[in-house]
Image: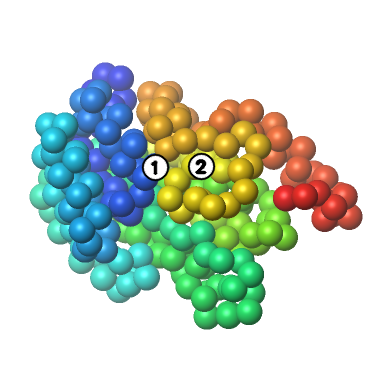
Amino acid sequence: MKDAFGIPQSLLILGGTSEIALATARRLIVRRTRTVWLAGRPSPELEQAAGQLRGMGADVRTVAFDALDSASHETVLGKVFAEGDIDMVLLAFGVLGDQARDEKEPLAAARVAQTNYTGAVSAGLIAARALQSQGHGSLVVLSSVAGERARRSNFIYGSSKAGLDAFSQGLGDALYGTGVHVMVVRPGFVRTKMTAGLPQAPMATTPEAVAAAVETGLRRRSETVWVPGALRFVMAALRHLPRPLFRRLPI
């Protein structure tokens, strides 16, 4: 169960090597989280992440999870929840893709969509049902400001995040009043390995800043979290900008 401040004692991360997710896990372990499940494709990186969190005093377990293998999600997540209640599920997997390449290779574009959206729909519904069965818990979904309005430079990624965001909001509405809390996190450009080499964007942030925002959101039981917070107003303006003007922006 969560403590009086809303901090989960047990955490399941779907996307166990995500830098944002691991920064969140580290922050929560310092607070009070004691059990962490890292779900991801088996790799030295996954085991290294688990070892680092164990070094902080947490009981960390790894489980093989593939976002693209939706048929396996029921079994994989079922095994985790069978071990005991989970206070928070952090849905953190996703790929950025390569816009220029993906426009020329539809199968590669479809893989981005399947990972970021289809896989998240499958895993999110299964996790939500498990949380509802236990009668409590939070589902935290890492979305992106890219989903607020598709940009020419990354509309394939942005469209997949738009779908994820809309799905997560609807899921939150469906679970309202059940004891399950759904929180959508919309970071801007985050400086991680995934974005290394890309041009720096205004108001860029870090995994640690996103983790801090997640913790604050949990305490407040927020439904939507923007990182940094000022992006809420920037995106509100961009969302309503006429398309002929929007096309001219260097974004």
Residue 105 locus on image (x, y percent) = 58, 80
Residue 228 locus on image (x, y percent) = 56, 31
Residue at the location (47% across, 36% down)?
A: 206
Of 35 and 85, the residue lying toward us:
35
Are circles 1 and 2 on residues that touch, CB within 8 Å? yes
Tell me the amino acid under the disc marked 2. Val
Figure quadrant of residue 178: top left
Residue at the location (51% across, 59% down)?
A: 96
In the picture, the quarter occupied by the N terminus is top left
- The residue wearing badge 2 is 190
Residue lying furthest front in this view?
Answer: 197
In-image side of 1 versus 127 (left or right): left
Residue at the location (34% across, 36% down)?
A: 24
- 1 or 2: tag closer to the N-terminus: 1
Residue 204 locus on image (x, y percent) = 57, 37
Q: How many marks?
A: 2
Q: Is residue 15 above or below residue 184?
A: below
- The residue wearing badge 1 is 20
